[in-house]
Image (cartoon, rainbow, N blue to C red):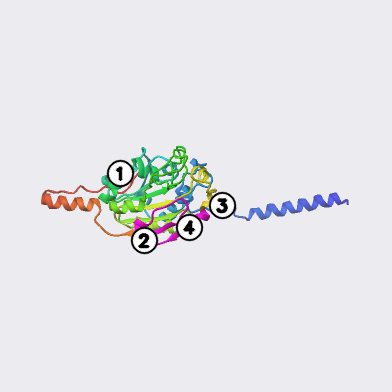
Amino acid sequence: MSDNCNDDLDNDFNNELLKNDLVHLDLNPVENPVERFLRSDRVPHIWCPGCGIGTTVNSFARALIDSKIDLGSLALVSGIGCTGRVAGYVKLDSFHTTHGRAIPFATGLKLANPKLNVVVYSGDGDLSAIGGNHLIHAARRNIDLKVICVNNLIYAMTGGQTAPTTPDHSTTSTNPYGVFEPSFNLPHLVEAAGAVYVARWTTYHVRQLSRAISEAFNKKGFSFIEVISPCPTLYQRRNKLGDGLDAMRDYKEKSKVRNGCPTSEVGMTMTGEIIVGKFVDRERPDYQTMMRAQFNQSLGDRFVEQQEMEPVCS
């Protein structure tokens, strides 16, 4: 028998063995625990390579798992911008609202159905510029909302304009010779306005971020979590700070964990250290508790509280 015939027999034998082995293999892929929170039919997403928003969504989903939140009682509200697209990618009852109006929309949801867990998930431009007035007064009133602010230090979706959080000396499309106006220190702003829980992490600190979101779910009142996130396409590139991986290295090297740090000391610069941690965790009555107390005091027996609805969104 020729060598070619022997080779053919060996190949047939090996193929038969392979078929038999495959019969006994479990070919079902291992499910990512985060996948059930995502709308897979919306993939691919619009976020650029190296963008950190997807990382924050991963941490958020893991916080939902760890907190054992009833998803039927959860509503997620976002505004306009790159982070605003989160509402379209999560498989939750979500609302993609108009620019700067995520917080008032979320406030209406919470007041109409107090048993809901309402999360506002948006960017620094949407929340602190056109939505800045609503941010301040929701914190002042201590509305029971969980606000996740993904801060990429720039207006990313609309072309890289200077945002209220853009550090001085940065280059943007509207400040090509460098930003000279002072930027917001968002943790300091919301603490001064009245927030009961304030934290900041970066997209490098995925576990700490997930833990902070879980803590916010267990906190009554206005909670604010700032997440410093890279924008490689506009902020990183224009300021010669490298790509998304370079941003992760910077976050690792420049971040200093200072839990309980006075928020007046956590302002950011373009190349300086980044103070992260849990800065504020305090107690004070939330809006609806104060409202009930005032109505009881003013109206006495005439005050009849409306029966609460079941916390089911859909």
Asked if disc 2 and disc 4 are in contact, CB closer than 8 Å, the reply is no
Q: Is residue 301 magenta?
A: no
Q: CA distance from mark 3 to mark 4?
A: 38 Å
Q: Earlier in the sequence, mark 2 or mark 4?
A: 4
Q: Earlier in the sequence, mark 1 or mark 3?
A: 3
Res. 123 in view = no
Reading the image, the residue beneath label 2 is 261
Reading the image, the residue beneath label 3 is 29
Tell me the element at label 2: loop
Reading the image, the residue beneath label 1 is 134
Res. 135 in view = yes
Tell me the element at label 4: helix
Q: How busy is the neighbourhood of tag 3: few (under 14 within 10 Å), some, or many (20 plus)?
A: few
Q: How busy is the neighbourhood of tag 4: few (under 14 within 10 Å), some, or many (20 plus)?
A: some
Q: Residue at x 28, y 43 (%)?
A: 108
Question: In the rendering, at what x and y percent does residue 129 appear?
Answer: 36, 42
- Amino acid type shown at disc 3: Pro
Tell me the element at label 3: loop
Instruction: Identify the mark at residue 254; answer none if there is no mark.
Output: 4
Q: CA distance from mark 2 to mark 3?
A: 45 Å
Q: CA distance from mark 1 to mark 3?
A: 45 Å
Q: CA distance from mark 2 to mark 1?
A: 25 Å
Q: Earlier in the sequence, mark 1 or mark 4?
A: 1
